Image: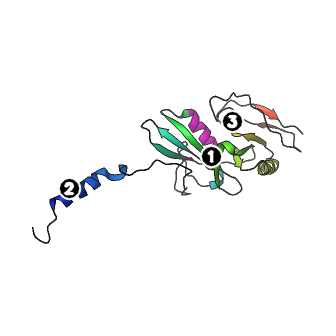
Amino acid sequence: MSRGSIHPVAVLLISLVCACGPGCGERDETGPPTLHLGSDVCDFCKMIISDQNFAAACVVRTSDGRTRTAAFDDIGCLLAYQRALDGGTIEQRYVTDYDDGEWMNATQAYYIQSPEVRSPMASGIIASRTRAGADQLALRFKGSVYRYDQLGGHADPDVPANRQEETVSNHSQSIDTEPRGGAETTQEMSE
């Protein structure tokens, strides 16, 4: 064998590594994604994700058993994606805190919905890590505070649409509490 030739076993090993490609050693995805604002695309509406403070994400287990992360430009897109999901299950859900843009577990967050919130896809929904933060945002945007399972019954198909509103003091007005795309109802906020 000459000094410049490659041994057949080495060729075989290199070929196996190349043939295996990205599937070998591929890890299941868990946790919220790292967003590339201005270039990542919403998995539901296909719009560019441009504002971290409205973002949402979920980890989906596909029918082949792998997991992948789906990212959204609006919490309303996450809700719509859940309703439309066919052939997989959502294992984790994440939203970002409106005030700091940090990811949190969607089922532990507090949600504010108001027509005054100008979210990317007009759901009017933002999230807060704490109840106190949610109350402040509700006062600022003249909205209502909800928990995840109260978002019009759309967050989980097993939750009835008749939800109970958590009240915010010092405001009394009628607002649309249904995420856009669903049947519209109104709720009166108590003083």
Amino acid on which disc 3 is placed: Asp
Q: Position of residue 4 (x, y in %)?
A: 14, 71
Q: Is residue 1 left or right of residue 167?
A: left
Residue pictured at 67% horizontal, 48% vertical: 119
48 or 127, which lies in front?
Answer: 127
Whole-Å distance between the Cαs marked 1 and 2?
A: 48 Å
What residue is pinned by disc 2? 12
Q: Quadrant of residue 35?
A: bottom right
Seen in the picture, residue 51 relative to 110 is either above or below; the reply is: below
Q: Nearer the viewer, mark 3 or mark 2?
A: 2
What residue is pinned by disc 3? 149
Residue pictured at 80% horizontal, 38% vertical: 166
Q: Position of residue 178 (x, y in %)?
A: 71, 35
Contact (CB < 8 A) between labels 1 and 3?
A: no
162 or 129, which lies in front?
Answer: 129
What residue is pinned by disc 1? 74
Whole-Å distance between the Cαs marked 3 and 2?
A: 55 Å
58 or 140, which lies in front?
Answer: 58
Contact (CB < 8 A) between labels 3 and 2?
A: no
Residue pictured at 71% horizontal, 50% vertical: 129
10 Å neighbourhood of mark 2: few (<14), some, or many (≥20)?
Answer: few
Residue 98 falls within the magenta-colored stretch:
no
Q: On the rendered image, what quadrant is the N terminus found in?
A: bottom left
Is residue 121 in view from this perspective?
no
Q: Is residue 50 left or right of residue 112?
A: left
| Mark 3 or 2, nearer chain start | 2
Q: Main secondary structure of the magenta part?
A: helix
- Magenta region, residue range: 71-83
Q: Nearer the viewer, mark 1 or mark 3?
A: 3
- Specify the label residue 65 is tagged with: none
Q: Is residue 119 left or right of residue 17?
A: right
Amino acid on which disc 1 is placed: Asp
